[in-house]
Structure formats: structure tokens, C-alpha cells
Image (spheres, rainbow, N blue to C red):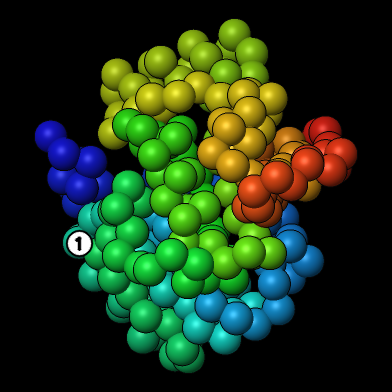
């Protein structure tokens, strides 16, 4: 089954599933005002049913919230309408083939998706392509590879639920993946949860730019 098909089947139960793993979501929302550019155009990838969309809309002048699943986007549009969010558009879009010109957005936000993607490197390359120079990527990602317990739990979930982690990141390997796609990682922090959340903020490198020292913060309370 295609990625879109998997998430289409899950759309009706998605909010219930998310509540099992959302221990750090409020911390992520609080950090957006600090880490995203003030105003400007922001692209949300893998928006699902809109767990972060309202918080992003507060920070952005224009927000494009996207998901690969048409069923998810339908529920997302309903939530945006009910919340009367302004300057928010919703669209079906694949992270592997973003329907946007180069250097379109001031910010890209992708929450809890890189680990379930078949090809996260391809998605990260697209994120970099559509970010303007000086733009910001915020990519909170569940860490299924931090220890043997989480790896075993992740394998079990992959067998009994639609949540299949194709990449079991720890914080270091998540940072490495983002950096390998042409980003400078400026924040890398582990937030608590049944699966810890790797909260990563990064900026696209320009040609011949040397990476500045990374700001690393481990294990937030």
C-alpha cells in the first residue's frame, strides 16, 4: 500500500493514536515563537489533522499546511475552518515532491514524520530546496532508537499498528541526517515521552559556508 493509502486508512483514528505519544507537544508549540521566523511564509509538512497548525498560524503571515493523505487534509481543512484560522491554506502534497518553486518559504515545519518516511533524505533535500537563504527548518521527530527498550517497542508497534518506523533515530543520527542534507543544526534537544522527541532546528547552508558550532541541549525536563 502507498504511504498516502496508509495514512488515509488511519485518518479517522489519528487523533486518538496521537494522544498516546503527545507528552511533549505543548513544549514544541511553545518553542515555535522562539525558533520560527517572525511572520513570512511557512510550509507545514505532514500536518495530519492539525496538531500544530493553529500554533504555526499565529507565527506565520501565510501558512501552507500539507499532508500526503487526502483524508487527513480533509479533516485538516475542517479543523482550520472551525478554528477560523486566517491566511492558512491546506493542500495534498508529498514531502518528496513539493509543489513549490525554489526558495519559497521562510520556514518549514515537519513534525513526527521523518522516522515514518520511506526516504527521509529525499524529503530533507526538498525542504532545503524550498527554503529561502536564512530560512529555518523545525523538525521534531520521534526517537525510536534511543535504547533497546524503545527499539523493541518500535518493532512491536510496527507489527500491530500503522505506525511503522522506517528509521529508528537517536538524537545523534537525526542530527546527522539533517546535516547531511545541507543544513546547519543550531538546536538539537531531546524532549520526554514514551518515545522521546528529537527537537531539531536547522538552517540551510550556503555554498562555501563553514558550519558554526552547534547548540546542543540534551534531555529537557
Q: Nearer the viewer, residue 170 or 22?
A: 170
Q: Position of residue 55 (x, y in %)?
A: 59, 72
In the displayed structure, 11 sits above or below 156; it is below
Q: Is disc 1 placed on a helix, strand or loop? A: helix
In this rendering, would 220 be left or right of 7?
A: right
Q: Nearer the viewer, residue 180 or 81?
A: 180
In the displayed structure, 47 sits above or below 162; it is below
**Residue that label 1 marks:** 70
Total of numbered circles in the picture? Answer: 1
In the displayed structure, 41 sits above or below 31; it is below
Q: Residues within 10 Å of mark 1 (few under 14, many from 20)?
A: some
Residue at left 57%, top 86%? 61
Residue 120 picture quarter: top left
Q: Nearer the viewer, residue 105 or 167?
A: 105
Residue at left 63%, top 28%? 176
Would you say residue 11 is visible in this rendering?
no
Amino acid at each position: 500500500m502507498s504511504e498516502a493509502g496508509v495514512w488515509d486508512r488511519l485518518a479517522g483514528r489519528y487523533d486518538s493514536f496521537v494522544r498516546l505519544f503527545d507528552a511533549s507537544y505543548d513544549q514544541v508549540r511553545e518553542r515555535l515563537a522562539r525558533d520560527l521566523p517572525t511572520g513570512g511564509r511557512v510550509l507545514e509538512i505532514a500536518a495530519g489533522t492539525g496538531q500544530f497548525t493553529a500554533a504555526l498560524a499565529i507565527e506565520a503571515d501565510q501558512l501552507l499546511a500539507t499532508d500526503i493523505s487526502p483524508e487527513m487534509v480533509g479533516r485538516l481543512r475542517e479543523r482550520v475552518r472551525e478554528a477560523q484560522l486566517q491566511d492558512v491554506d491546506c493542500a495534498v502534497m508529498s514531502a518528496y515532491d513539493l509543489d513549490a518553486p525554489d526558495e519559497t518559504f521562510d520556514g518549514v515545519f515537519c513534525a513526527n514524520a521523518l522516522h515514518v518516511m520511506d526516504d527521509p533524505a529525499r524529503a530533507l533535500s526538498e525542504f532545503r530546496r524550498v527554503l529561502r537563504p536564512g530560512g529555518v527548518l523545525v523538525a521534531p521527530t520521534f526517537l525510536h532508537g534511543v535504547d533497546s527498550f524503545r527499539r523493541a517497542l518500535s518493532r512491536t508497534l510496527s507489527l500491530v499498528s500503522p505506525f511503522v518506523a522506517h528509521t529508528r533515530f537517536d538524537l545523534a543520527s537525526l542530527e546527522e541526517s539533517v546535516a547531511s542534507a545541507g543544513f546547519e543544526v543550531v538546536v538539537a534537544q531531546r524532549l520526554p515521552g514514551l518515545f522521546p522527541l528529537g527537537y531539531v532546528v536547522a538552517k540551510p547552508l550556503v555554498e562555501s559556508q563553514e558550519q558554526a558550532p552547534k547548540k546542543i541541549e540534551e534531555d529537557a525536563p
